[in-house]
Amino acid sequence: MGLIFFLYPTDIIESVNIGHWLPILTGFAIHLAVIAMYMKGMSYFPRMDLVDGLRTAGNAVAIVLLLPVAAYLVMICVITIRAYSEVVTIVFLSSTPLWAIMALLLSISTYVAMLGIEAIFRTALLLFVLFIPLTVFILSYAFQNVDWLYALPVMDTHTATFAFVQERSFLLSLFAFSGGFLFLGFVQPHFRYKSRSILWSSLILLPLFLLSVYLPVLTFGQNTAEKFQFPFIMTVDTISIDWLMFDRISMFFLLSMITFVILFLATVMWKLIRIIRFKWNAKPAVLIPALSVALFVTCMNIPDWKHVSDLLWWNTFFRIYVMVIIPAATIVIGVRYRKRRV
């Protein structure tokens, strides 16, 4: 959810001036197609995770396929830590050193990742119970300043011809979709799920994607919203609730989203360690802290937001690889694996 409300609105608002719903639906359709392909491929390995499934084609093939995935996950960790530390600094901890915020995010994520996948799932359930009601409350009040005329017109030539798919900002927006679906292939030996249930559950996220973009646009208008670094945070800042004793409700919203970001980081680190242990069978209690230190040092060497944006763009190529090659590879390798077993 943190990915949806922080970085995603900026990219979609920059990709088109009119008809934001079409880029949102296009990205979401790609998301569903990728999940469907990925789960179809993983269904051929019912008792294996992604790493073991790819190993059925040989260790060399698995290494070649997983190296870009590992690079992608490392870049996700670096981008997430650096970007959301910047958000926290901008919104309410302006006098706190950036390194301290990054260290806090990393230390909590490292601790959760070391506890294992069961602890991650239990933490996710707890966070859902604690913060989803608060999120719904804030989203409902975010409509108080909207002007529905900003939703018109619903489309122009640039949007109708899908010219936005070539825009850098649209390609960057896929970051919100590509971050989580790999998780399904890593938890398969630990938890069983039905593909149809996952696809239907994914539809719950669609209103969040729409709200994250349209609330800033309907509040400020396209010309103003596209000038903000974090449009949705600015929208939440405009909320005024007379009976609430706190002046800035955006602080509570940000804190709730940051908890989900920490959980996301823990999940990505856990997946990365699973890939690393494919070749180096060291204990997670050693690998995860070492990875955490390496990530912190890397983040400290990113000087400003421009370099974060550049890193997001460079990650696009790995993102497309993960969304296209990995699902296709699981299907091809899975079909061959099933034929050998028959």
Image: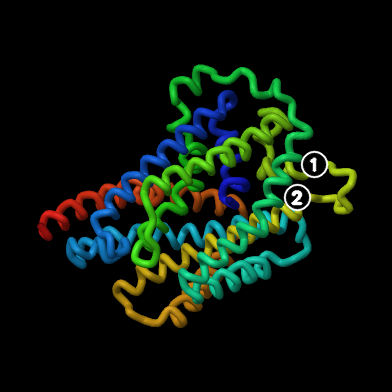
Image location (x, y in percent) of residue 94? 76, 59
Element at label 1: loop
Q: Is residue 331 left or right of residue 233?
A: left
Residue beneath disc 1 = 239
Q: Can you say which quadrant of the picture contains the C terminus?
A: bottom left
Nearer to the camera, 326 or 301: 326
Left or right: where does residue 152 sit relative to residue 120?
Answer: right
| Number of the label disc, if any, that sits on residue 250 | 2
Residue 204: image x %, image y %? 53, 43
Q: Residues within 10 Å of mark 1 (few under 14, many from 20)?
A: some
Q: Is residue 161 left or right of residue 97?
A: left
Q: Which residue is at 37% across, 51% downward?
A: 194
Amino acid type assigned to the residue bearing label 2 in the image: Ser
Residue 43, given in percent of the width and then of the height, sits at: 28, 54
- Element class at badge 2: helix
Residues 338 and 89: in front is 338
- The residue drawn where x is 68% and y is 70% is 100
Residue 340: x %, y % from top left: 10, 58
Q: Are discs 2 and 1 less than 8 Å apart at CB?
A: yes
User: N-terminal of the two: label 2 or label 1?
Assistant: 1
Q: Amino acid at mark 1?
A: Ile
Which corner quadrant of the image does residue 36 belong to? top left
